[in-house]
Image (spheres, rainbow, N blue to C red):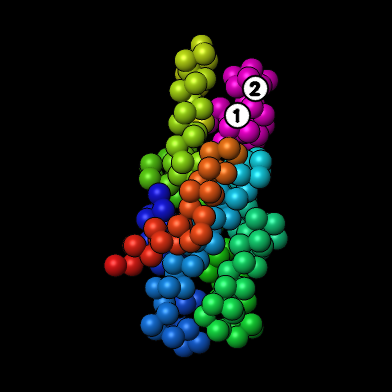
Amino acid sequence: MLKELFDLIKENAAGPVINNPQVPNEQNDAVVAEATNTVASGLRNMVAGGGLQSIISLFNNSGQGGQNNIQNLLSNPIVNMMIGHFTGKLTNKFNIGSNEASSVANNLIPSVISNLINKTNDPGNSTFSIENLLNSITGGQSEQVVQEQQQSGNTGFNLQDIISQFSGNSQNGGGSCGGLMDIVSKLAGGAQAQQQKNGGGGLMDLIQGFMK
């Protein structure tokens, strides 16, 4: 799903980056790649730190007036973390002035997250499902968790059961996914393994491959 995220960010970068005279044209792709790294790493790091519930809350509150409203996103701690990180990269890595860097980050990151939320909540768009997102973040660990639950007798279990538990939409009072914290821990472990695997610039190397 990393390639799809890169393409989504490139689509949203027309105003803040590509047509911005403060961002040199020769740096456009590199800035888009850095934004992709910021979003992907930010989501993965949240899951790795046990913040799965925060991710699900962010993506589950959709619709008019929901979390994908730009003003609401600007006050979301996950999005703020990404904006701050991306602003620092624009300033230190690309030598963009602090005010302009802040403007680019504040315009691009919330717009990308808003579009990502809309796409993951679109039942007709299987590419951007929350299941695919979590599977990508955890290196396939989410699929393994589903298989383990089903093999242990929890037939019909899927990631939507976890999402329902955290969002308060469960129809059975929490019985559908026993050991919820154990599941969160396993997904965190998968995300941590991805952090180690992609450490030292590995994730950025993958993203830069999309620019060729």
Q: Is residue 131 above or below residue 99?
A: above
- For disc 1, the marked residue is 183
Q: Determine whether 99 is above or below 65 in the image.
A: below
Q: Position of residue 204 (x, y in %)?
A: 45, 62
Determine the residue positioned at 60% across, 86% down: 97
> In the rendered structure, which amino acid carries the disc numbered 1?
Ile
For this view, does 6 lie left or right of residue 117? left
Q: Is residue 179 magenta?
A: yes
Residue drawn at x 60%, y 29% as measured from the top left: 183
Residue visible at 52% across and 80% down in the picture: 94
Name the outermost residue toward the left: 212
Secondary structure type for disc 2:
loop
Amino acid type, callout 2: Gly
x 66%, y 41%: residue:
50
Q: Which residues are magenta?
A: 160-187
Residue linked to disc 2: 179
x and y percent of residue 5 in the render? Answer: 43, 56
User: Quarter of the image holding residue 6?
Assistant: bottom left
10 Å crowding of disc 2: few (<14), some (14-19), many (20+):
few
**Are dots 1 and 2 in contact, CB under 8 Å?**
yes
Q: Residues within 10 Å of mark 1 (few under 14, many from 20)?
A: some
Residue nearest the viewer, comparing 135 with 12: 135
